[in-house]
Image: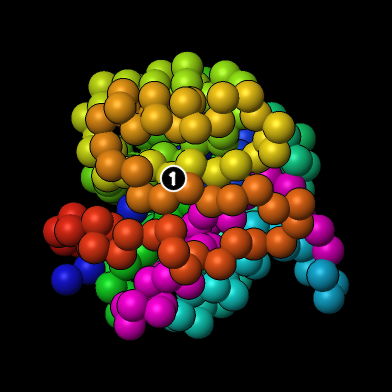
């Protein structure tokens, strides 16, 4: 049965790609066919004469299904800034309808078991004057996994984001803590507060790493992720 999840974060630079890659690798190890999408990316580098996004490349490499880059990341903006501002610089218009169409086209034609769709920035990142990226998982009717960047202020950010997700009518399937501050005060106490107050299970906590991607072994609960029955 095909399942898909939207990966969002409490903010930008909290480790959405790190978590998504680790999940894809864990799904692969569990024998599931995995698919990773980054429908919208802001921030590009030139590789081999073409512009690409490093996060999208990471998802492309980690997934078990081999997709062309343009299917993984159909909308690429070069400037590393809020997507609606980057789009204005390139005189492009972003819309939920077009992003959802790209996702549906790929999801309908690929033989995956679990698809992970990574967002950009946080939950309420604007796409235009009327829409935000939160409207994309709503259009896809997609359960959400929240990445919490573990640092000072994460309690407020996490609880507000979880509240917004539920207010938008979507299921919060679970959350993952990502240690982004090695000197965070009261680390365990903050983590226990999140576990007690967030209305979804903790799927795992990633350790602090100065560089590189974490191995998923030992932290991702495969059973919790695959308990959600979701049909296209």
- 66 or 221: nearer the viewer: 221
Name the quadrant containing residue 126: top right
The residue sitting at 28% across, 73% down in the picture is 113
Judged from the image, the secondary structure of the residue bearing numbered disc 1 is: strand
Q: Is residue 58 visible?
A: yes
Residue range corresponding to the magenta coloring: 18-46
Q: Is residue 191 above or below residue 197?
A: below
The residue sitting at 59% across, 75% down in the picture is 61
Drawn side of residue 159 relative to residue 21, left or right: left
Give the crowd class for mark 1: few <14, some 14-19, many >=20 residues within 10 Å: many
> How far from the left and from the top, in percent, is residue 95?
47, 38
The residue sitting at 27% across, 37% down in the picture is 200
> How far from the left and from the top, in percent, is residue 125?
53, 29
Quadrant occupied by the N terminus = bottom left
- 163 or 52: nearer the viewer: 163
The residue sitting at 33% across, 77% down in the picture is 30
> How far from the left and from the top, in percent, is residue 169?
22, 30
């Amino acid at each position: 049965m095909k399942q898909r999840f939207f990966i969002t974060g409490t903010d930008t630079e909290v480790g959405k790609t790190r978590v998504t890659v680790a999940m894809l690798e864990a799904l692969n190890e569990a024998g599931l066919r995995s698919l990773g999408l980054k429908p919208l990316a802001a921030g590009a580098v030139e590789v081999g004469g073409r512009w690409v996004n490093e996060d999208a490349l990471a998802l492309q490499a980690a997934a078990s299904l081999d997709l062309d880059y343009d299917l993984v990341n159909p909308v690429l903006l070069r400037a590393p800034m809020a997507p609606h501002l980057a789009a204005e610089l390139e005189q492009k218009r972003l819309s939920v309808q077009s992003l959802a169409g790209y996702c549906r086209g790929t999801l309908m034609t690929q033989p995956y078991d679990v698809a992970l769709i990574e967002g950009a920035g946080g939950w309420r990142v604007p796409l235009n004057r009327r829409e935000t990226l939160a409207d994309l998982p709503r259009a896809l009717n997609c359960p959400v996994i929240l990445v919490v960047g573990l640092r000072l202020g994460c309690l407020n950010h996490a609880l507000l984001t979880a509240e917004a997700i539920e207010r938008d009518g979507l299921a919060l399937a679970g959350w993952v803590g990502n240690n982004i501050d090695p000197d965070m005060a009261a680390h365990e106490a903050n983590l226990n507060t999140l576990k007690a107050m967030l209305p979804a299970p903790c799927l795992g906590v990633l350790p602090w790493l100065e560089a590189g991607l974490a191995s998923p072994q030992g932290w991702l609960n495969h059973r919790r992720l695959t308990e959600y029955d979701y049909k296209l």
